[in-house]
Amino acid sequence: MRGRSLAAALALAFGATTLAVFVLVGSFLYVALEKQLKAQDNLDIVLAARHARRLAEELDSAQGIREHSERLTSIVLGNEAMSMEVFDPDGTRAIEHNIAGALALPDAASGAATIAALPPLARVAATARITETDIGDWTGRGGAPIRGILTDARLRNGDTASVLVARNMSDRWLLLDRYRDKLHMAGVAGVALAMLLGYLLIRAALRPLRDIAASASLVTVNRLDTRIAVARVPSELETLVASLNAMLERVEHGFQRLSRFTADLAHDMRTPLSNMRGAAEVALARPRSVDEYEALLASNLEECDRLSRMIESVLFLARAEHPQFVKQLREFDAGQELTHIADYFEGIAEEANVRVRVNGAASVTADLELFRRAVSNLLANAIRYTPPGGEIVLAASASADAVRVTVENQGQPIPAEHLERIFDRFYRVDPSRSSLPSAGLSQGSTGSTGLGLAIVRTIMELHGGSVHAESGPRSTRFVLRFPRAR
C-alpha cells in the first residue's frame, strides 16, 4: 500500500493554515468596514437632525414650515438614501422628502399621514442634545432597513414641531454583501493558489531527500564502499546524511570482517580435515599394523579435538555478540582466582618448563566464568610463546576507576604493527600455527585456533572494559581493564 505523499500533506496543511488566516483577516476587515460605515451613517443622521432642528427653531410658526420647506429639505438634498419629514404641532405631516416608500407611513395624498403612524421611536426633547444613542432602527416598506432620529423643535411662537431624519440602509447592506462575496472569492482563490505554490515549493524543498534516496539505492553488496553524496544538502539534513554514511561504513566494515572471518574459518577448518584425509589415504594405501592404525586414530582424534575447540569458540563469539547475552556479575577476589587458574595450568607449565607466579589482589565485579576464560586464554597463549626456563607473571591491581589484571611472559617481542591486530579472529603473528595440547581445559583454552585473543576482547567488551597488549624487548604484557562498579 502506497503511503501518503508528504508534499501533498504539507500542502494541505499549508492551505488549511492559509484558509484560517484568510477567515480571520476577512472577518476582521468585514466587521471593521461595517463599523466604519455605521459610524459614518450615524454621524450623518445626527448632523442632519441637529441642522434640521436648528433651522426649524428659526421659524415663527407652523405656516413657516411649509413656506421654507426647500430650506429644510436641502439638508438631505443630494443623498437619495436620506429622508426627512416635518410634522406640525398638531402631528400632521407638513414636509416629506425622499421617502420613496421607504418609511412605513401612508402617502401624504391620503391625508392620514400623522406622527402617530410613525414606528415607536424615542423622541428627543427640543432642549436635549441629539446624540448617536438617540438613533432608532425599524423596517420600512418592502422590508427595507431604516435608521433615523425623531426630535422636537421649538418654534418662535412657542409651538413644538417634530422632525424625522432617516436613512435607508439597503445600499449599505448591499455593499457589505458584495464585499463579503468578494472576500469569499478571494479567500478560495488565495487558498487554492497557496496550496499549489506550497506543493511546488515543498517538492522543491524535498528534492534533497529524493537525491539521498537515489544515492542510497546505489548501495549493493558489491558496492558497500558507496557513500551518499548529495550536493548542497540543507543543514537540517546534514546530520541524516552523516548518520547514513556512518551506518554504511559500519555495515561495510562488518561485512568485510564477516568475509575475512568466513574465509579464515574455512581455511582453518580445511587444514585439520586435510590432515585427517591425507593420513587416512596413506593408511589405506597398503595394509598397516595395529600400532599404525592406532596412531592414525589418535592423530585423527587430535584433529577432531581441534575442530571441536574451533567450533565451540565460534559459537561462543556468536552468542556473545547477541544483545541478549546473559552475564552473571558478582564480586570476587581477582588475586585468588588468578591463583586458582595458575594451579590449574601447573601441569602444562611444567611440561613446557615454564614458571607461573601470581602477584597482587583486588576486588573485581565480573562474570566469574568469563573472567576465568579470558585469563586462561591469555595464560595458554603465554605458555605457548615463553621460552623454556622463562617465567609468567599474573598480577591484579586496583585504581580509583578500574581493576587491572595483567599476564606478562618473557620471550620474543611482538612487532608493533601486529599489536592491534592480534585480537582479530584467526589472526596469528607466527606463520607456523603451532598448537598447544588442550589437556582437557574446560576454561576455554583454544590451542592454535586463532580465536583465543578474539574471545578475550569480546569478554572485555561485554564487561564494558578493554584489553591491550604491550611488548618490549624481553617480555610481552596483556592488560585487562575491568571498570569499577558504580
Image (cartoon, rainbow, N blue to C red):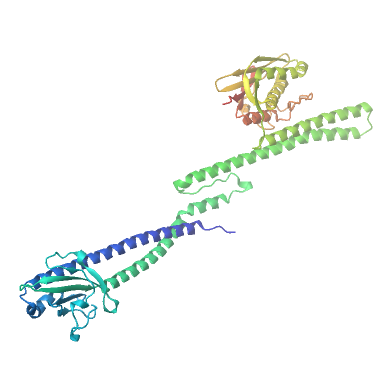
Q: Where 86 falls versus 462 (above or below)?
A: below
Res. 422 visible in picture: no
- Residue at the image position 72 percent from the left and 18 percent from the top: 340
Q: In terms of depth relative to the viewer, which is nearer, 5 or 452? A: 5
Residue 338's quadrant in the figure?
Answer: top right
- Residue at the image position 18 percent from the left and 73 percent from the top: 165
Residue 47 point in image, percent of width and height: 15, 67
Res. 315 visible in picture: yes
Residue 366 point in image, percent of width and height: 64, 26
Residue 325 point in image, percent of width and height: 67, 35
Q: Where 92 falls versus 423 (above or below)?
A: below
Left or right: 139 with respect to 75?
Answer: right
Q: Where 174 falls versus 17 (above or below)?
A: below
Q: In terms of depth relative to the viewer, which is nearer, 82 or 352? A: 82
Q: In terms of depth relative to the viewer, which is nearer, 419 or 39? A: 39
Residue 358's quadrant in the figure?
Answer: top right
